Image (tube, coloured by chain):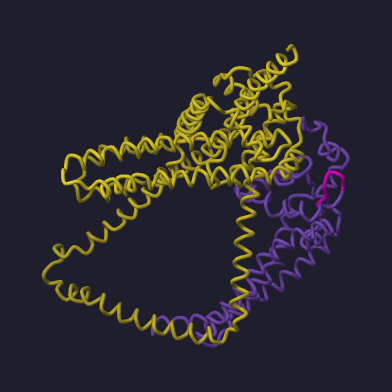
Amino acid sequence: MKNSTNPHSHDQIISNSLPKQNYASFVQRMMAYITDSLILGLLTTGSLAYLLSINNQVDLIYRSIILITLVFIPAVVFGIIYHAWFLSQSGATLGKQIWGVEIVDSNHQHLSFGMAFFREVILKQVSYLSLGLGFLWMIKQSDKQTWHDMLIGTYAKSTNKPLLISILWFLSVLVVQVGLFYYSISQLPVFIQLLSSFIKL
Amino acid sequence: MLEKPIINSSSKFQSWDITSFFKHSVGLARRNPKLLLLAIAFLVLSAGSMGSYNTNFPNLNQDQKSSNQEIEVNQNVSIPFNVLFNEEDLKENDSDKLTSINNLPDNLTEKNILFAENLEDIIETASKKIPTWVYIFFGVQILILSLFVIGLSLATTAWAQAAMIQGVRQAEEVDNNQWSLSQVSKFAISKIKPMIWMNIVPMIKIFLLTVGITIIFPVSVGLAALLFNTNTQLISIFIIIIAFIFALTFAIIMISKIIKIIFVRTVGQRLVVFKTIKANEAYQESKKIVQNKYGKMILLSLSHFIILDIILTSLSAIPIIAVLGTFISSNFQTYLNSTKDQLFSTVLNSFSVGWVSAILLASLITIIASSCVKVIAVVVKNANWHWATLTLLSKVDNFASKVNNQTQIQ
C-alpha cells in the first residue's frame, strides 16, 4: 500500500483559481475574531452583571454556584459548538458573517461539522499557542492561509460585504457589550463593600 | 505476518548508519519547511504525552528534576523570613514590638476561626437555597466534560504523532515541499484510533512494570527478613543480601523490558501509519522487527539526546550566557571590593538600564533560538526514526523474500 499524495494537490488548484482580492484580509479576519469574542463574551459579561448585583453574602455564594453550573460550563460547550456549527452550516460564524469572511475547503465547499470542529478546537491551538505566529503568518502568504488553514486545507474567502454595514453591526454588538460591562462596573462598589464587611468581621 | 507494501524508494537505507540518518534528516528538513509546521503542531498538541516517539531515556528524569528544583526554591524562600524574624537581632527597646509580634498569631487565629465559622454559615444557607438537581447536573457536567477533555487530548496527541510520521514519509517520497499538508493531516485523522491504542497499551504496560520495580525491593527484603528470621545474625544478613540481589536482577530485567516496550512502540507507531493493519497487529509485528536491535536503537536515542538535546540546546543558550558572563566579569572587581553588608546593594546597583535591556534581549533571543532548536529536533528525530524503521523493515523483508525464494526453489 502506498499512500502518496498528489503533489499538484487541491491546495494549489484553488490558490490558482481564486483571484487574490477574493481572499479575506488580515484586518477582516481580526475584526471577525473580535466580533465573535464580543458575541460570546455577552454571556460572560451578563453573568458578571448578575453576580455583582448581589444583596448579601449568601446571595454571592448562591449565584456563584448557579452561574458555574448553569452558565459557565455550558458556555464552554456552547463556544466550541458555536464555531463548528456555524462553519459547517454557512461557512462563517456570526462575526465572520458581519465582516464578510467565509471559510471554504479546496473544492469551495463548506466544511463538515467534524472537520470544522477539528479546525476550530484542535488546529487553532497550533496558531494560538505559537504566540499568535500562526495567525500573523497569513500576512505574507499570497493565499492568506493561517497555520490552521494550511493544516486542514481551508481558505478564508471574502464575500465583499459593504464596509459600512459591517461597521454598523460591529458597533451594535459593541454597544450591548459595553452597556452590560458598564452596568457590572456600577455594581462593583456595593459588591466590594459586602466583601470587605465579610472579610473584616 | 509480514507484508511488503512499504518500501520502494526507501530501500536506500539498507544498513544502520546513524551519521547517514542525520545527514538525510537535516537535508529533508531543509528541503521541506512544511515539516517544521507539523513539528510545531506536534510540540503544541502532544505536549505532556509520554515521551512521544522521540525516545530519549534521559528525558524521563526531567519531571523529577524540576520538582526537586521547585522544592529547593521553596526552601530558599523561607530563608529571608528566618532572617527577618531572628529575635537575637531585635534590640531590647523593641520589646513592645516583640510582644505584639508574639501576640499576632493568637489574634490571627481568633479572626480566622470567626471568619471560617461565618463562611460556613453562609455556605450552608446558600446551599439550602439551591435545588438538588443543580448539584446532580453539576456532577454530570463535570464528568462529561472530563471525559471529553481526556478523549480530546488523546485524539489530538494521536493525530499530531500520526501527522508527523506521515509528513516525514511524504517529504521523503515527494520531496522539495511539493506535498500537501492538508492531505497529510486528513490521512492522520484516519489513524487516530490505532495511534491512541499505541499510546495507551504500552503506557499501561510500562506503568505496571514501574509499579513492580518500585515494590520489589521493600517486599523482597521485608519478606526475607520476616520469613527467615533466624537467631544467627550473619545468616539473616546473608538472606537479606540474597533477596536484595534477586530484587536488583528483577529490576534490571523490568527496566530492560520497559526500554523494549518503548522501542516496540516507536516502530509500531510507524507501522500503523505505513500499513493498513490494526494497532495490535502492528505492535506484534514491531516486536518481531525490533528483536535483537535494541542496542542500535539505544545508540540512536543517545545520539539524539547528546546532539539534539544537549549540544544544540546549549548552543541556543549562548546569547544569555555571553551577556551574563560579560555582566559578571565587568562588575566582578566591584563585588570583590565591597564589604559583606554592601554586597547585595552593590549587585543591585550594577543593574543599569543598559544591562537590564541587554539581559532581557538576550533572554528573548535564547527563548526564540531554543524554540527553533526544539522544532528542528522534532523533525530530525522523527526522520531518523523513519530511516531506522525503514532499515529494520528492509532487513526483515529481504529475509522474508529470501525465505520465499528458497521455498519456491524447493
In front of the other: B238 or B150: B238
Q: Is residue A105 magenta?
A: yes
Q: Which residue extends farthest top?
A: B409
Q: Which residue extends farthest left?
A: B92
Q: Is residue B96 visible?
A: yes
**Which chain is yellow in the rendering?**
B
A69 relative to B31, above or below? below
Which residue sits at x=74%, y=44%?
A: B190
**Which chain is purple in the rendering?**
A
Q: Which residues are magenta?
A: A103-108
Where, quadrant-wise, is the C terminus of chain B in this rendering? top right
On the image, the x and y values in percent for residue B208 come to 48, 47
In front of the other: A179 or B367: B367
Q: Is residue A139 visible?
A: no
Which residue sits at x=58%, y=43%?
A: B43
On the image, the x and y values in percent for residue A37 come to 69, 63
